[in-house]
Amino acid sequence: MDLSKIPLLTGLAARTSVIARNIAKADTPNYVAQDVKAPNFKAMASAASEMQIADPRHIAAAPGIRSGGNQVQELTLVFVPRIIVMFITIAICLPFMGGALGKFATKLYGRIAVGGIGGG
């Protein structure tokens, strides 16, 4: 992927270059610091939101269809079922885990009370 085609990155690179030049020439007499023109982020965002064809074999989008719209993202479709399965698993295993933890705590506190390792 050619990063030089991304307007935001090229703008940041240009600004970094100008700032470095300003710092290097800061002690030069009569030097006037320079800056780059601020990018038009609104125009860049609207241009980036339109669907773009990366390969000529791809099917072109219908006019007016945007890639960002109100689509349910793929990660959400995978994430939500996993969360549901986790809650179901916890609900099923919680009584067993609670019972085991209760027995362990009772045994541990009983050993602490008598001051020894042995005992039942």
Image: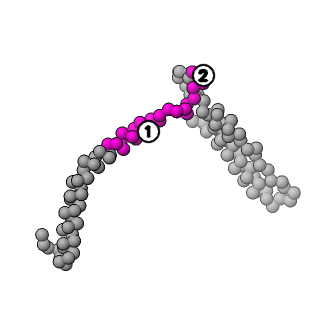
**Element type where label 2 sits in the image:** loop
Percent from the top left, x then y, of residue 39? 71, 41
In this picture, which residue range is highlighted in magenta? Answer: 62-85
Percent from the top left, x then y, of residue 114? 17, 77
**Element type where label 1 sits in the image:** helix
**Pointer 2 residue:** 63
> How far apart in space, not on screen, are marks 2 and 1 (Cα)?
27 Å
Between 76 and 34, the one nearer to me in the picture: 76
Whether the magenta-drawn stretch holds residue 82 is answered as yes
Between 82 and 37, the one nearer to me in the picture: 82
The disc placed on residue 76 is 1
Between 36 and 93, the one nearer to me in the picture: 93
Q: Residue at x 23, y 53 (%)?
A: 95
Q: Residue at x 75, y 57 (%)?
A: 23
Question: Is 23 on the left-hand or right-hand side of 82?
Answer: right
Q: Is residue 89 above or below residue 119?
A: above
Point out the tag, 2 or 1, that comes first from the N-terminus: 2
Estimate how packed mark 2 is, as few (under 14), some (14 to 19) or many (20 or more) residues with alpha carbons within 10 Å. Answer: few
Q: Residue at x 60, y 36 (%)?
A: 2
Amino acid under label 1? Answer: Thr
Question: Is 49 on the left-hand or right-hand side of 105?
Answer: right
Whether the magenta-drawn stretch holds residue 21 is answered as no
Estimate how packed mark 1 is, as few (under 14), some (14 to 19) or many (20 or more) residues with alpha carbons within 10 Å. Answer: few
Q: Residue at x 57, y 29 (%)?
A: 66
Question: Is 67 on the left-hand or right-hand side of 84?
Answer: right
Amino acid under label 2? Answer: Pro
The disc placed on residue 3 is none
**Is residue 92 something that shows in the picture?**
yes
Is disc 2 in contact with disc 1, using a CB cutoff of under 8 Å?
no
